[in-house]
Image (tube, rainbow, N blue to C red):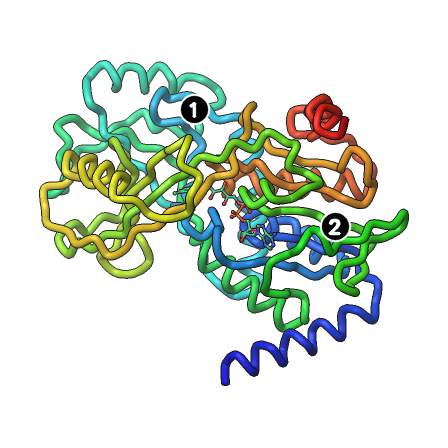
Amino acid sequence: MLVVIHCYLFIVIYSLLIIKMLDYIVVGFGLAGLSFSEQLQQNKKSFVVISEEEKSSSVVAGGMYNPVILKRFTSPWNAVSQLEFAMPFYTAIENRMNIEVNNPLPVLRVFNAIEEQNNWLIASDKPNLAPFLSVSFKKNENEFILAENDFGIVEKAGRLQVAKLLSAYKSDLQKSDSYLNGSFEHDALEIFDAYVSYKGIKAKKIVFCEGYGMKSNPYFNYLPLNGTKGEVLIIKSEKLKLDSVVKSGVFLIPLDEVDHYLVGATYHWTDKTWEATDEARLELVNKLDVLLKCDYQIVDQLAGIRPTVKDRRPLVGKHPEYNNLFVLNGLGTRGVMVAPIVSDQLFDFIENEKILDAEIDVERFSAEYKNVSK
Ligand SMILES: Cc1cc2nc3c(=O)[nH]c(=O)nc-3n(C[C@H](O)[C@H](O)[C@H](O)COP(=O)(O)OP(=O)(O)OC[C@H]3O[C@@H](n4cnc5c(N)ncnc54)[C@H](O)[C@@H]3O)c2cc1C
């Protein structure tokens, strides 16, 4: 019955779409696709999203936004401006859709040695880190956390409930017949000077937001998307009662569901499969056992591939030959903070002829395109 309803809805939406010329087709609905869709909604553009649901890095993501690299106490690329843009961006969606998905949460960094505390204090003097690194440390009062020294506190960090946000946003798009669930077949795309056509759906422009799926996109797979596999565990522990994120060898992040925590993540550069592995589970359990002094149950294990790039910068811009094909990708390990601002930059580039920041513009890989198109 459900399948029949699904097919019927698909036919109705599809029939409505092929009649008119849309402004945009958006392919892929993770953080990149959602952020660009939000730009389109805010600017009253007509569009349809086409996305499959599997193989999504966003659904697996811990959803942390954290403006400090906690290994070396340095600032990630453009973190301050990304955060300043991202917070009101997500709040606007929360308000419009009447949902709560952004949970500000301090991050408690476990210090392994007094020397690390000193390094923290030195870092907290730097202008780009001062707003985030608290100069007062916090005593460990949780008997189930193993931490001999005090914690350093990162302020203005938090967690975006990405899966919940995507699901709510998708339902909203479905209400206006703007979401098609399924795989985009690149062979079926026809490109004309003034528009593109996909199985009868016509749009002035198409934006590919496919994450690691871009590897199968013949128009943009010349770009050096490496991909870094990551896995997380979901655990349940009744004793722990944490209301902050704790970072030692892993992040331990309290989830919405009572007594549930996300533990992650791993980094694997050669395995490009989407399946969870025993190896990652063992790595996470070993790191967790150094941090926790209480029992826990593993409830789930999730795996995804982060769309990481050779030069660690997003992939944003226009196809070298086709003026109506665009890409929004390469969000790397920090999609929550990066996606809103780069989607805004892409929109301004397309619609308002604003020049893209050279660091994110795919133009920087034009030599790679020339090599493959020879
Ligand atoms: C384990 C793990 C933990 C992470 N933790 C964090 C974190 O705490 N904070 C943070 O900011 N980031 C985190 N990340 C990184 C974050 O997930 C990414 O930066 C971000 O989600 C990438 O979003 P995206 O939209 O570009 O790609 P994706 O989320 O992968 O979305 C791409 C979508 O396009 C669809 N698609 C692809 N090809 C096609 C096609 N041909 N037809 C139709 N649909 C297609 C896919 O199915 C998918 O739904 C983590 C990643 C992993 C794997």
Which amino acid lies under the numbered mark 2 shown in the image of this protein?
Ile
Which amino acid lies under the numbered mark 1 shown in the image of this protein?
Ala
Q: In the rendered image, is residue 95 in sight?
A: yes
Q: Position of residue 310 (x, y in %)?
A: 55, 25
Which numbered circle lies on residue 5? Answer: none
What residue sits right under mark 2 in the picture?
Answer: 206
Q: Earlier in the sequence, mark 2 or mark 1?
A: 1
Q: In the rendered image, is residue 83 in sight?
A: no
Q: Residue at x 64, y 59 (%)?
A: 50
Q: Residue at x 41, y 28 (%)?
A: 68
Q: For numbered disc 2, what is the local secondary structure?
A: strand
Q: Residue at x 23, y 52 (%)?
A: 235
Distance Cα–Cα, label 2 vs label 1? 41 Å
Decide if residue 68 is on the left or right side of residue 294: right
Of residues 10 and 287, which is closer to you in this image?
10
Farthest residue toward the front?
Answer: 374
Of residues 205 and 356, which is closer to you in this image?
205
Q: Are marks 2 and 1 in contact (CB under 8 Å)?
A: no
Label 1: how many Cα within 10 Å (few below 14, some 14–19, many 20+): some
Q: Residue at x 56, y 82 (%)?
A: 4
Of residues 228 and 143, which is closer to you in this image?
228
Q: Looking at the image, is 166 positioned above or below residue 136?
A: below
What residue sits right under mark 1 in the picture?
Answer: 130
Label 2: how many Cα within 10 Å (few below 14, some 14–19, many 20+): many
Q: Position of residue 263 (x, y in %)?
A: 28, 44
Decide if residue 311 is on the left or right side of residue 219: left
* Nearer mark to the viewer, of 2 and 1: 2
Decide if residue 87 is on the left or right side of residue 206: left
Q: Position of residue 61 (x, y in %)?
A: 42, 46
**Is the distance from the Cβ of mark 1 to the nearest ligand 1 atom less than 8 Å?**
no
The quadrant the C terminus occupies is top right
Q: Position of residue 249 (x, y in %)?
A: 25, 31
